């Protein structure tokens, strides 16, 4: 037994009901499975109800035995009665229109006839019959034939008069509807035994109420489709073909309608093998939004067999007829890789002259022996999507046309698709498309991108045509919209024509060539620019505030005026266009004074007397902002120290300079310019920090230049100097002093430290200076940190002073100078050792030879004298490179850093050399 389920992902966006998943059974014994109805998530809605009234009524009277009274006013008489006109005996008839119930399943029908009055309430006997239709010929003497007694009624215990209510007419109404009757005629009478007894006479309403509950069966499922592939139902075998790997899941659709709203519909599906009907699937699944869907899981279902399927739909009351039977055949065989041929492009030679840009070529796809190929899919280079083309017949070829629009290497890919939607592997064929368009050149009219000033409107130019086809016999051409002309190719295949452009700007010459075999290429579009724009003459660099002359010279014949305008670096107009007349020689001049620094462009065009306008000339202009050069010539290094600044600008007619420091940008100052256009000012900083000193020049017309500036730093940190501890080179490691000079007014002390910010105070003198003593504790690199402090607690910035000290001995020798060569093999020399730190008791030294071989003499010591110095004598035994290593020893036994002293020893010259 195999369980069937619906993969809901196959129904995106569908509203699903919470319906239990039922079981589909594969029966191999020939016995069909009986499936339970699908469970519903809620109680089914009540059946629709229709209330029918009579369409007409009538009565007959024994007192008038030959006539019938139809739709008379008043109540409907039943039985005998005595009136002033004499005795009567009547029967009443009601005709009901059943056409609204056609096609319905009548589930129940209840009749109510109101009773209006009675002669004697104690005597009551009434019968309800169905009769043949009442006609105009009906009468008491000739009543409609009574067909069936439907109901009877005796005396009522609930009062008098009493309605006839809840009379069950279900069978009668259902029978009439099923028989296709349009009407139902009801007769109300008194039984024959009492029909002439006036005590049983009574009167009823001339209308009735027939309340019918019914159900409309669902329609026969329509628009049946197979989901894999999406195809309409095939009602004959072998039916729709599908890929075998789709068979593990087969899906089917059908449209279902039910006129009764709100009913839950369930479709019952059947699927079986045509070869062996005992191999089958059954599935119940709810209908959603008017569509029935089934998805069968078919693991192991054999391919290459034909299967049938159908469905019927129930609403819980009635079941539709079966749908047509549809057929499906899974195909497990892929088609062969197709072949592709083209007499134009897929030839033995990749450079076959038959093809080229614009030359259409037919490509034919064949199935390579596969007999069930339904279509082909193909794509050419540059196409990302596959295009489908049907086979001319099942297993037959298909032909498409490809017209290249470019030259180069191309390929065509093709694959076969059989009727089961199986795809073959892809076939790719490469081919080459030549550019067979002619080549065009003109030495007067260059291709767009460059222009020859010798060309112009109406100026003839020669255009050279070279063949794109190897056997070109002629060229067809036209300039712009001019009529086509044809020129024969010369023996070399070339042609030359003379043409004069009729307008300025871009022109297009269209040229194509024709081969001896009639092949015609596409047009080559030769685009060239005819320059009619005026020539602009001016300086490339213009200055703010300077009147700059511009001269315009025409290239458009008959120029009468020029229009020019300026644009900014975003191509936005800077003001309105200006039009100036041309002079007698066709030129025009104007002057423009830029007012600010910017990247601008001048655009100009000319116009002739007929209103023809030239092309627009574009000239880029760089505007020099003539920003002043600002120079700090002296001072302003510290708060309160005046500084001198000079201003110089190339602006013409400078009247004054506007200047300001960054410490007070809102307060702008002015200074008149000297005759040479320069100016000098004095400014005193009041606080430490970085300062930008900015200036602008202003000319006599009031135009301001761009801003020029200089930057510098105002320091309030102390200045540190020392004669004992110099910055370079390393000095001796002995006690010394630092001179501290304040740059902050009101300094009373210095916070002094070396190699850290743990400071000690050094009182400042009245002049803001102090001396700080210091003894280096170690050799090496050291940094002094110092800042000034005022009486009110204000502190300056930190000042820094770095220096290096060393305790390694100083080695010297007049006999063998350092880093020099001396003649001295066997010549004694004296080497002196001097201390760089106090307290030396002796020196430890060693002589090393590094070349031509490496040797080390024993380490030796020499005592230091009272002044801490010592000397030794040493005689080299051979030439070579030598160096001394020397360390001083202190009284505590510690050694100083090592000093290195290198020199070389040369052999004395040989006598006679």
Image (tube, helix red, strand yellow):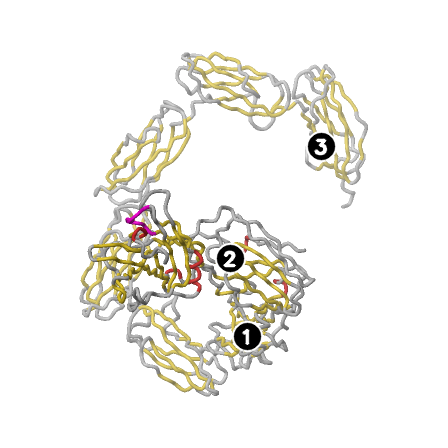
Residue stretch rendered in magenta on the structure:
113-121
Q: Say whether residue 691 is visible.
A: yes
Q: Using the image as rendered, state which of residue 875 and residue 427 is in the foreground.
A: 427
Q: Is residue 586 above or below residue 345?
A: above
In what quadrant of the picture does the N terminus appear?
Answer: bottom right
Gap between marks 2 and 1 measured at Cα? 64 Å
| Secondary structure beneath label 3 | loop
* Dot 2 and dot 1 residues touching (CB under 8 Å): no
Name which of mark 3 and mark 1 comes first in the sequence. Answer: 1
Instruction: Determine which quarter of the picture holds residue 279.
Output: bottom right
Location of mark 1 (residue): 432
On screen, residue 814 versus residue 606, left or right, reads right
Gap between marks 3 and 2 measured at Cα = 125 Å
- Give whichever of discs 3 and 2 has the lower sequence position: 2
Q: Which residue is mark 3?
A: 816
Residue 728 x %, y %: 57, 28
Given residues 418 and 267, the one toward you in this image is 267
Name the spot of residue 151 as percent of width and height, x first: 41, 54
Q: Which residue is mark 2?
A: 314
Seen from the viewer's position, the closer of residues 517 and 881 is: 517
> Does label 2 or label 1 sit earlier along the sequence?
2
Q: Is residue 93 above or below residue 895?
A: below
């Amino acid at each position: 037994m195999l369980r069937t389920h619906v993969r809901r992902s196959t129904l995106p966006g569908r509203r699903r009901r919470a319906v239990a998943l039922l079981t589909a059974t594969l029966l191999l014994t020939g016995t069909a499975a009986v499936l339970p109805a699908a469970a519903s998530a809620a109680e089914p809605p009540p059946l629709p109800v229709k209330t029918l009234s009579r369409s007409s009524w009538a009565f007959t009277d024994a007192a008038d035995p030959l006539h019938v009274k139809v739709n008379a006013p008043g109540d409907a008489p039943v039985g005998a009665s005595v009136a002033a006109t004499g005795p009567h005996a009547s029967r009443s008839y009601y005709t009901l229109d059943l056409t609204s119930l056609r096609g319905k399943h009548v589930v129940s029908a209840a009749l109510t006839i109101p009773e209006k009055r009675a002669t004697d309430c104690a005597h009551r006997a009434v019968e309800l019959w169905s009769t043949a239709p009442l006609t105009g010929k009906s009468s008491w003497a000739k009543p409609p034939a009574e067909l069936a007694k439907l109901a009877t009624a005796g005396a009522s215990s609930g009062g008098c008069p009493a309605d006839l209510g809840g009379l069950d007419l279900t069978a009668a109404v259902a029978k009439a509807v099923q028989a296709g009757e349009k009407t139902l005629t009801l007769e109300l009478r008194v039984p024959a035994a009492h029909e002439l007894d006036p005590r049983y006479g009574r009167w009823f309403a001339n209308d009735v109420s027939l309340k019918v509950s019914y159900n409309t069966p669902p329609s026969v499922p329509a628009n049946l489709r197979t989901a894999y592939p999406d195809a309409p139902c095939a009602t004959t075998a072998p039916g729709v073909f599908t890929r075998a790997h789709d068979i593990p899941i087969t899906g089917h659709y059908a449209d279902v309608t039910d006129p009764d709203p709100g009913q839950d519909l369930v479709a019952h599906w059947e699927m079986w093998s045509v070869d062996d009907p005992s191999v089958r699937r059954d599935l119940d699944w709810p209908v959603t939004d008017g569509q029935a869907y089934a998805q069968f899981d078919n693991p192991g279902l054999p391919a290459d067999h034909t299967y049938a399927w159908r469905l019927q739909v129930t609403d819980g009351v009635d079941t539709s007829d079966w749908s047509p039977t549809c057929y499906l055949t899974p195909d497990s065989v892929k088609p062969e890789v197709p072949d592709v041929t083209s007499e134009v492009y897929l030839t033995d030679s990749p450079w076959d002259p038959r093809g080229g840009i614009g030359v259409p070529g037919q490509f034919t796809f064949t199935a390579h022996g596969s007999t069930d190929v339904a279509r082909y899919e193909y794509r050419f280079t540059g196409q990302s999507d596959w295009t489908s083309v049907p086979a001319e017949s099942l297993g037959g070829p298909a032909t498409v046309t490809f017209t290249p629009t470019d030259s180069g290497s191309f390929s065509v890919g093709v694959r076969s698709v059989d009727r089961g939607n199986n795809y073959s592997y892809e076939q790719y064929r490469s081919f080459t498309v030549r550019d067979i368009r002619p080549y065009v050149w003109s030495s007067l009219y260059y291709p767009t991108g460059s222009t020859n000033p010798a060309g112009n409107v109406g100026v003839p130019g020669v255009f050279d045509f070279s063949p794109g086809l190897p056997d070109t016999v002629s060229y067809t051409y036209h300039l712009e919209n001019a009529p086509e002309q044809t020129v024969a190719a010369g023996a070399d295949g070339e042609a030359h024509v003379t043409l004069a452009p009729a307008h300025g700007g871009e022109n297009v010459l269209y040229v194509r060539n024709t081969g001896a075999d009639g092949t015609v290429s596409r047009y080559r579009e030769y685009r060239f620019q005819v320059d009619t724009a005026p020539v602009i003459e001016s300086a490339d660099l213009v200055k703010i505030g300077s009147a700059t002359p511009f001269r315009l010279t025409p290239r458009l014949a008959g120029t009468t005026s020029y229009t020019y305008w300026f644009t900014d670096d975003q191509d936005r107009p800077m003001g309105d266009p200006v039009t100036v007349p041309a002079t007698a020689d066709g030129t025009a001049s104007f002057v423009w004074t830029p007012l600010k620094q910017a990247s601008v462009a001048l655009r100009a065009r000319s116009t002739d007397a007929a209103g023809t306008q030239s092309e627009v000339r574009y000239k880029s202009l760089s505007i020099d902002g003539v920003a002043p050069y600002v120079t700090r010539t002296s001072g302003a290094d510290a708060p309160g120290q005046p500084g001198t600044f000079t201003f110089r600008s190339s602006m013409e007619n400078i009247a004054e300079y506007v200047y300001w420091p960054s410490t007070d940008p809102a307060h702008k100052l002015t200074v008149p310019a000297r005759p040479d256009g320069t100016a000098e000012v004095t400014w005193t900083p009041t606080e430490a920090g970085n300062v930008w000193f900015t200036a602008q020049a202003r000319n006599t017309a009031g135009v301001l230049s761009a801003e020029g500036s200089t930057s510098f730093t105002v320091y309030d940190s102390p200045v540190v100097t020392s004669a004992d501890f110099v910055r370079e080179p390393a000095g001796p490691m002995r006690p010394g002093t630092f001179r501290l000079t304040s740059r902050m007014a009101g300094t009373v002390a210095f916070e002094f430290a070396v190699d850290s910010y743990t400071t000690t105070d050094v009182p400042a003198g009245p002049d803001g200076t102090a001396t700080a003593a210091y003894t280096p504790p170690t050799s090496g690199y050291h940094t002094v940190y110092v800042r000034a402090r005022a009486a009110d607690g204000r502190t300056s910035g930190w000042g820094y002073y770095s220096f290096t000290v060393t305790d390694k001995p100083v080695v010297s020798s007049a006999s063998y100078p350092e880093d020099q060569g001396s003649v001295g093999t066997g010549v004694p020399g004296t080497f002196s050792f001097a201390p760089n730190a106090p307290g030396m008791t002796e020196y430890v030294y060693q002589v090393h030879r590094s070349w031509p071989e490496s040797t080390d003499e024993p380490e030796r010591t020499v005592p230091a004298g009272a002044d801490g110095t010592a000397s030794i004598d040493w005689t080299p035994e051979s030439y070579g490179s030598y160096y001394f290593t020397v360390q001083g020893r202190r009284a505590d036994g510690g050694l100083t850093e090592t000093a290195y002293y290198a020199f070389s020893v040369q052999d004395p010259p040989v006598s006679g050399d």
